[in-house]
Image (spheres, rainbow, N blue to C red):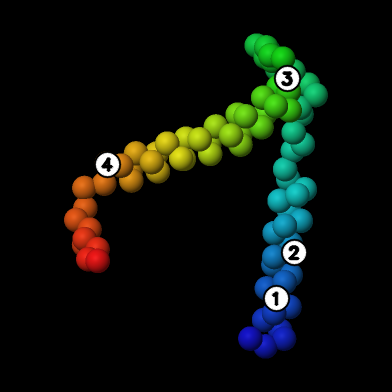
Amino acid sequence: MDKKNALRAGTVAAGTTLMMLLMSSPALALISDDGDDPGPGLSVAETLGLFVAAPIVLFLVIAGLVMVLDKSDRPKKQA
């Protein structure tokens, strides 16, 4: 790739990024919409339990069930 094509590709990428940033609207998180009824926030322990511990436990349960219920033929080890 020569220098001219690299400059053109960089210009297109920068222009596209700039246009996307300029055209995107801010997330109006501080303004409530009609019908919003947010509940109480989660504590640190609840957040870690919900987003860290629960997926790990679910993965381990599924992996355990797959290993226990595996019906494939395995070669027997000979002593």
Name the N-terminal-most of marks 3 and 1.
1
- Would you name the residue on which mark 2 appears? 14
Name the N-terminal-most of marks 2 and 4.
2
Asked whether 36 or 58 is in front, the reply is: 58
Residue 8 is left or right of residue 51, and the answer is right
Q: Quadrant of residue 15?
A: bottom right
Provide the secondary structure element on which disc 1 rests: helix
Viewport quadrant of the C terminus: bottom left
Q: CA distance from mark 2 to mark 3?
A: 39 Å
Provide the secondary structure element on which disc 2 rests: helix
Q: CA distance from mark 4 to mark 3?
A: 40 Å
In the image, residue 25 above or below residue 17: above
Amino acid type at image mark 1: Arg
Name the N-terminal-most of marks 2 and 3.
2
Provide the secondary structure element on which disc 4 rests: loop
Q: CA distance from mark 2 to mark 4?
A: 53 Å
Amino acid type at image mark 4: Leu
Contact between labelled residues 1 and 2, with CB atoms less than 8 Å apart: no
- Would you name the residue on which mark 3 appears? 41
Q: Position of residue 32 (x, y in %)?
A: 74, 18
Front of the two marks 2 and 4: 4
Residue 69 is marked as: 4
Q: Position of residue 55 (x, y in %)?
A: 53, 36
Amino acid type at image mark 3: Gly
Asked whether 5 or 44 is in front, the reply is: 44
- Would you name the residue on which mark 1 appears? 8
Number of residue marks:
4
Front of the two marks 3 and 1: 3
Name the N-terminal-most of marks 2 and 1.
1
Amino acid type at image mark 2: Ala
Contact between labelled residues 4 and 2, with CB atoms less than 8 Å apart: no
Q: Position of residue 60 (x, y in %)?
A: 46, 40
